[in-house]
Image (cartoon, rainbow, N blue to C red):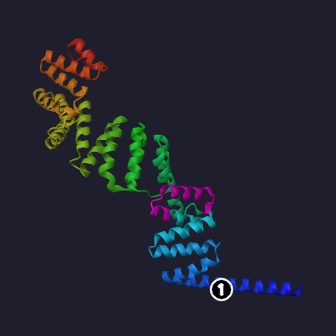
Amino acid sequence: MIRKLAYLIILLGGFFQMQAQSEDLMVDGMRAYMKEDFTEAILVFEKLAKVQTQEPAVFYYLAKSYLAEKQLTSARTNAEKAHLLSPYSFDYGVLYGDLLLANKEFKKALDCFEKLLAYDDHRLDGEPDMIRVKQFVFLSKGDDSKDLAEKKAYYLKAADLGSVQEELWVRIIQLDWELNQKDQVVAHAQEALENYPHMAAWVYPILGDAYQALGNNAASDAAFDKALKANPKDDHVLNNYSYFLSIRKEKLALADSLSARLVADHPRNGTYLDTRAWVLYELKRYPEARVAMEAALKDRENVSATLWEHYGDVLFRLKLVDKAVEAWKEALRLEPGRQSVDKKIQMRQIPEN
């Protein structure tokens, strides 16, 4: 009994001595780490890791020390050990996840971050790292989703958390447009502009299109005017603005100026020449409109039923009825269900409203 007790005392003595040595090493390692002497910190923490194999803090600071020395492989290995030993630690998980991202292991990083979010710790909700983790998860889920509405919902969750890259606003607004949610296009375009004023050259053109679709002509014109101030040579704006004015039969002098500038820079683009022709048509400058339409039809890649119908309308105004009917028939061949064209062919004239 006395021998067993003595042996136990020796074992306990060795244990406490080892604990004391471990504590000393931890203090030394942290002292070196705080002094940014990461080479020394690595030496100390590596010694400690051999005896404290289940202590996550040791591997965490070892990983951070390796990271400071730009030794990413060793940093990732030790960060993984810390995370596995303490999977609910947000700090350990974030470090491991970030190192996975640095190593382009995106699926593993997503899995790591999702598990961190599953651990409900609301005291971290407002902290930058928590916001960053949530944004990464939402963006990843949005990128992976095939459903446009679901994709947009994830992107909006990421945006609602705080500052995001401009590209995310572009994607959200484009999804609004694809989902035919023009009111959302307006709301999100304005929000993007508030966050990033230098996006004006991209935001105002799509605002002009969205307001036009919503029937708010004044707001559409104002947006296009601002777009042209941001980029006077934006061909999308020059085309859409002048075309919308022509179909509304408003500000035709401005439409004339805009469409002339457009085709001066793009003399072979069929779509743009068609816009120019229609502005001239509304100005009753039919011979000029015919020239523009015939130039538009030479652009085989952009020929459409709309172009042939417009050409027929121009020819009709020039009293070339037989040629107008031929053009309308070509429009109907390209788009058989085009009722407006069928009616013109049957009547051999443009119905007056």
Residue 143, position as x, y percentages in the image: 45, 48
Q: Nearer the viewer, residue 30 or 315?
A: 30
The residue positioned 61% from the left and 78% from the top of the image is 50
Which residue, as the protein is rendered here, is positioned at the far top?
A: 346
Tag 1 secondary structure: helix
Q: Quadrant of the N terminus?
A: bottom right
**Residue 281 shows up from this direction:** yes
Q: Nearer the viewer, residue 296 or 315?
A: 296
In reply to whether residue 119 is colored magenta, the answer given is yes
**Residue 35 shows up from this direction:** no
Q: Nearer the viewer, residue 214 or 89?
A: 89
Q: What segment carries the magenta color?
A: 98-123
Q: Is residue 124 left or right of residue 35?
A: right
Residue 10 versus residue 148 in the image, above or below: below
Q: Quadrant of the C terminus?
A: top left
The picture quadrant where one finds residue 9 is bottom right
Determine the main secondary structure of the stretch shown in magenta.
Answer: helix
- Count of labels in the image: 1
In reply to whether residue 79 is colored magenta, the answer given is no
Q: Is residue 57 left or right of residue 70?
A: right
Task: Name the amino acid, label 1.
Answer: Gln
Residue 152, position as x, y percentages in the image: 46, 45
Residue 259, position as x, y percentages in the image: 18, 38
Residue beneath label 1, please?
A: 21
